[in-house]
Amino acid sequence: MKSITLRLAILSALWVVLGLTVVGLYVDRVATRQLQNAADARISALHDAVTANVEFDPQGLIQLPHSLPTPEFEQPLSGVYWQITATGNLLRSKSLWDEILPPPRPDGPLWSTIKGPRNEAVRLLARAITLPDFKQTVWVQVAVAQENTERAIASLLLGLGVLGALLVAGVCAIVIAGLRPLRRARTALQAMRGGQSASLALNAPDEIAPLFDEINALVAENHRTVERARCYVGNLAHALKTPLTVVINALASSTPDLALAQQQIALLNRTVAHHLARARISARSAAHSAQTGAYPLAIAQEVAAALRRIAPRIEIAVAGNAAAQAAIDRQDLIELLGNLMENAVKWVHSRCRVEIGLCSQAGSDVDSAARIRIQIQDDGPGMPDEVASTLARQRGERLDEVKAGSGLGLAIVEEIALLYGGSLAIVPKGALGGLRIDVTLPAFGAV
């Protein structure tokens, strides 16, 4: 059974049936007893009324000199009967017609259920009384048909059955109506798959609205992944076109230029390695990679120690908050800082500075730091404003094809930052006179 609607409807119906079964048992035991007690109270009252009117005439015969206020006693076979029995005497109500009640037994029960004149079940009360000045024992019997009581109980049970059916139908209708947003979501997903819409534009209830939001976010992320893949293919094709042409021309000439061909082949290897690195970074899920976070200051100090061995004359200063932890995979952070610091050392005159700090989330009312700021600058030649503006306009498209001052690894840096929800900003002239790169990353554990 895979249908949620059918499953919930069946379970709800079973629960309602179980509840009504318990109520039915309660009615059968408690309510039936109460109805029977009420009927017995009426019989007892009728018995008292008959008993109060019993007298003996001068000949010693039983008589009822006064009429009873119950008209059913006068109607033949009405279901309400009385009978008075004494030694040699029998007096009965007109309602008995030509029938008689079973003779009373001294050792018999006070209350009993017997077959009446019409072969119907009647409730019988039989009591023995003694009248003043008469030594005879007089038995007064009053019987009332159980039909009305049984009809009342049957009506009550029928009402419970009808109520149960209505409850089951209502529960099924509620389940079907409650799951309607999921069926609408299925239709919307089919429209998305068919290219008719780009997202689930549904007015969903609060309970499942976050699910639709996550689906929309997943679809948007898949679209971005596809666009990045297209961009990578275009970048790779563009980057390989010129070196391949040079290699073909160098080898196709009458005097092959092997040195030039080897140089271009090495360039091809570096280009392919570069694009493979970008593809690896983009394919990695930031949600799964950044489970523990990384400390930018410690990693920047490790990278700076390695760069000092390569360029011992360059001053590389690293400072900042050692407790700042970024929500990023450690290996990706090493690649990000390595590319930026290596690029800075490449263009620096004498010194380079790396600062790690905390900053508040843009547009957030939260006072606590929600972002990690990484600032790298040098005293090199910097970058012309028009080149920086070109880089800003081409952010996320074909950044690696902009050659002037961009560096081979700047595109990878931006891909890493964007992957983890960060950003990259280029300042042509920083405080040291050269280029300044500002990278922001989410702080680990920030909401």
Image (cartoon, helix red, strand yellow):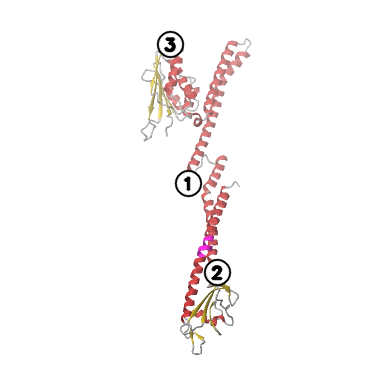
Three-letter amino acid code of the residue under disc 3: Pro
Q: Residues within 10 Å of mark 2 (few under 14, many from 20)?
A: some
Three-letter amino acid code of the residue under disc 2: Glu
Front-lying residue, 39 or 72: 39
Q: Which circle's residue, 2 or 1, is located before the other in the chain?
A: 2
The residue under label 1 is 205
**Disc 3 and disc 1: Cα gap in Å?**
63 Å
**Disc 2 and disc 1: Cα gap in Å?**
49 Å
Q: In which quarter of the image is the C terminus?
A: top left
Front-lying residue, 84 or 300: 84
Q: Which residue is drawn at 51% across and 36% down?
A: 218
Q: Is residue 444 above or below residue 312?
A: below
Residue closest to the far top: 255
Q: Give the range drawn in magenta.
A: 24-31
The residue under label 3 is 312
Q: Does the magenta stretch include residue 151?
A: no
Residue at disc 2, secondary structure: helix
Task: Report whether residue 406 is seen.
Answer: no
Residue at disc 1, secondary structure: loop
Q: Is residue 30 magenta?
A: yes
Residue 150's tag is 2
Residue closest to the far bottom: 59
Three-letter amino acid code of the residue under disc 1: Pro
Q: In this view, does 51 lie above or below 200?
A: below
